């Protein structure tokens, strides 16, 4: 009987399904570690080819692979370094598995460390605007509330996913006053807020961020209204990309900005998330970002490139 082939895509999506708190880059690294456990390659070159193929399969298995790619790139860089440092193949395999476990353990602490750091910027009686669903932003807000800080939150509806509605519900359950606002009402509500907090799918080399669609316009409005715009992100979401504009992102987007089908569906009352013709993420340039709260500390956008160099070289 032939040995069953390990399905890295199935394993990866299973991790995310079984643990909603698990972020995409961490799940990607965990999946690659599992590939190493199952792989029976006899040479270094064959071993690297298998890992590279697995990494590519993971990227192609999801529409928005920015944060997933960041995790894959980080771990693959570590694998490359380790292979050059260790000549014994089996010793190298065991070291990679062990180091993968250590990374996963440290990754679970990142969110708590960032929450403790970022909550210092939430003053008493503050009004905060957030966008979409971000585990690390939620952790920051919950930590600030645990310090008996009183504040209220405006949450964008976050179309097309509508995740803001669920986020507002979770905040209210935690005793934090939260109100959902339309994405189109961000400019209207900006005068009332003291700061803006957003997560990130990826933090790029120039200190800009890739995040759910709508983040860019929110950042522009915050800049215009002279409100601080803070990004909250783990360092394993730092990705080696340098987009020059919105259409320079390596993710699936529509070819044009036409919404004909959407207009027709709206008239018929059949507008759903699947019907939207829109990109899932956008790019916010660094000049709109005040600070980034990370597990590496509080960074200015210009400091991101230095940290990326440390991570990858």
Image: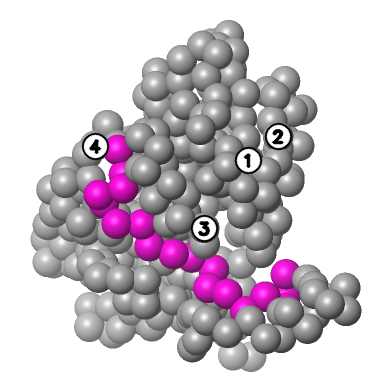
- Any part of residue 54 in sight: no
Which quadrant is home to the C terminus?
bottom left
Residue 121 x %, y %: 39, 21
Label 1–label 2 contact, CB within 8 A: yes
> Closer to the N terminus: mark 1 or mark 4?
1
Label 1: which secondary element: strand
Mark 2 Cα-neighbour bin, 10 Å: few <14, some 14–19, many ≥20: some
Stretch of the chain drawn in magenta? 273-290
Of labels 1 and 4, the one closer to you: 1
> Closer to the N terminus: mark 2 or mark 4?
2
Q: Which mark is residue 179?
A: 2
Q: Which residue is mark 1?
A: 155
Q: Which residue is mark 3?
A: 214
Is residue 81 toward the left or the right of residue 21 in the image?
Answer: left
Label 2–label 4 contact, CB within 8 A: no
C-alpha distance separating marks 3 and 2: 18 Å
């Amino acid at each position: 009987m032939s040995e069953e082939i390990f399905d890295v895509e199935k394993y990866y999506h299973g991790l995310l399904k079984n643990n909603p708190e698990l972020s995409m880059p961490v799940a990607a690294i965990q999946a690659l570690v599992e590939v190493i456990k199952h792989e029976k390659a006899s040479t270094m070159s064959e071993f690297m080819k298998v890992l590279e193929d697995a990494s590519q399969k993971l990227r192609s298995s999801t529409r928005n692979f920015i944060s997933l790619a960041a995790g894959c790139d980080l771990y693959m860089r570590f694998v490359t370094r380790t292979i050059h440092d260790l000549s014994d193949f089996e010793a190298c395999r065991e070291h990679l598995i062990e180091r993968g476990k250590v990374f996963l353990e440290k990754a679970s602490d990142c969110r708590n460390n960032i929450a403790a750091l970022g909550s210092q910027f939430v003053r008493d009686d503050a009004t905060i605007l957030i966008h979409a669903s971000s585990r690390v932003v939620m952790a920051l807000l919950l930590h600030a509330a645990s310090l008996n800080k009183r504040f209220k939150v405006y949450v964008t509806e976050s179309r097309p996913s509508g995740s803001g509605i669920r986020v507002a519900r979770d905040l209210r359950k935690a005793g934090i006053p939260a109100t959902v606002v339309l994405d189109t009402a961000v400019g209207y509500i900006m005068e009332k807020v003291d700061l803006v907090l957003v997560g990130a799918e990826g933090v790029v080399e120039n200190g800009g961020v890739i995040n759910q669609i709508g983040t860019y316009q929110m950042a522009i409005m915050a800049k215009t209204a002279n409100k601080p715009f803070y990004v909250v992100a783990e360092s394993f979401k730092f990705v080696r990309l340098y987009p020059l504009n919105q259409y320079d992102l390596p993710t699936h987007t529509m070819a044009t900005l036409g919404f004909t089908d959407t207009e027709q569906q709206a008239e018929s009352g059949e507008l759903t998330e699947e019907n939207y013709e829109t990109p899932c993420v956008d790019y916010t340039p660094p000049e709109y970002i005040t600070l980034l709260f990370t597990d590496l500390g509080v960074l200015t956008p210009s400091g991101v490139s230095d940290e990326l160099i440390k991570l990858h070289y």
